[in-house]
Amino acid sequence: MYRAVVVKGLRPYSTKASVARQAVDRIIRVDHAGELGADRIYAGQMAVLGRTSVGPVIQHMWDEEKEHLAKFEELVPKYRVRPTVLLPIWNVAGYALGAGTALLGKEAAMACTVAVESVITDHYNSQLRELISLGEEDNKELIDVIQKFRDQEMEHHDTGLAHDAEQAPAYAALSGVIKTGCKAAVWLSERI
Ligand SMILES: [Fe+2]
Ligand SMILES: [Fe+2]
């Protein structure tokens, strides 16, 4: 239930339009950050594993991440969203995560993919529910983009499982740490 509160001399706040606007801002900001991080993770994985048997598999996922990032690079100015100030951190952290897990072996790289993509898929699904609740017609462009990317992230997740992610050393611990890190990165990127 949205109610405009009008105080003389001040603009109304908490209108449905401003709630939707804030949600769209937050969604584009965090997704842009996430796709930058994903691009850097796969770049780091490719630097280590590019010439191995899983090189082409990682390259294919990386190519899709490049498209995701390019799309959000386009949406940030289009919707006049301020990007998160944390981009330089996600740039370095993403690469370090990708290269670091790849150095542990291809299974650990795939475990990283499964963990990251599962958090992102859940996150995209909750954004879709939110955007639909705010108005399917008003948010059609963003809903279509997120639906398409959500499906591709799900495929990346399944690709990781198909390439022995669960055979990684200390799989459960590795997966838990990466998921927690991703959720923290999401939380921060939505806010600053
Ligand atoms: Fe992506
Ligand atoms: Fe992905």
Image (tube, rainbow, N blue to C red):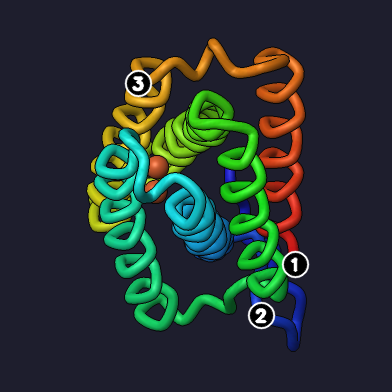
The local secondary structure at tag 2 comes to: loop
Q: Is mark 3 within 8 Å of ligand 2?
A: no
* Structural crowding at the residue carrying mark 3, measured as other residues with C-alpha within 10 Å and reported as few (<14), some (14–19) or many (≥20): some
Is the residue marked by circle 2 packed among few (<14), some (14-19), or many (20+) residues within 10 Å?
Answer: few
Residue 64 in the image, given as x and y percentages of width and height: 27, 51
**Residue 118 image position (x, y, % from top left):** 50, 27
Residue under the point 67% across and 66% down: 92
Residue closer to the observer: 38 or 106 = 106
Amino acid under disc 1: Ile
- The residue at which mark 2 appears reads as 11
Task: Return the x and y of residue 158 as percentages of the image width and height.
Answer: 35, 21
Q: Mark 2 or mark 1: which comes first in sequence?
A: 2
Please tell me whether mark 3 sits on a helix, a strand or a loop: helix
In percent of the image, x 43 and y 75: which residue is there? 76
Residue at the spot x=23%, y=48% of the render?
144
2 or 1: mark nearer the eye = 1
Q: Within the image, what quadrant is residue 70 found in?
A: bottom left
**What amino acid type should be assigned to the residue bearing mark 2?**
Arg
Which of discs 1 and 3 lies nearer the camera? The answer is 3
Disc number placed over residue 192 in the picture, else none:
1
The yes-or-no answer for disc 2 within 8 Å of ligand 1 is no
Which amino acid is tagged 3? Answer: Asp
Towards the viewer: 58 or 151:
58
Q: Is residue 47 above or below residue 80?
A: above
Image: 82 above or below 137: below
Instruction: Give whichever of discs 1 and 3 has the lower sequence position.
Output: 3
State the residue position of label 3: 158
Q: Is residue 150 visible?
A: no
Closest to the observer, 153 or 54: 54
At label 1, counting other C-alpha atoms closer than 10 Å, the crowd grade (few under 14, some 14-19, many 20 or more) is few
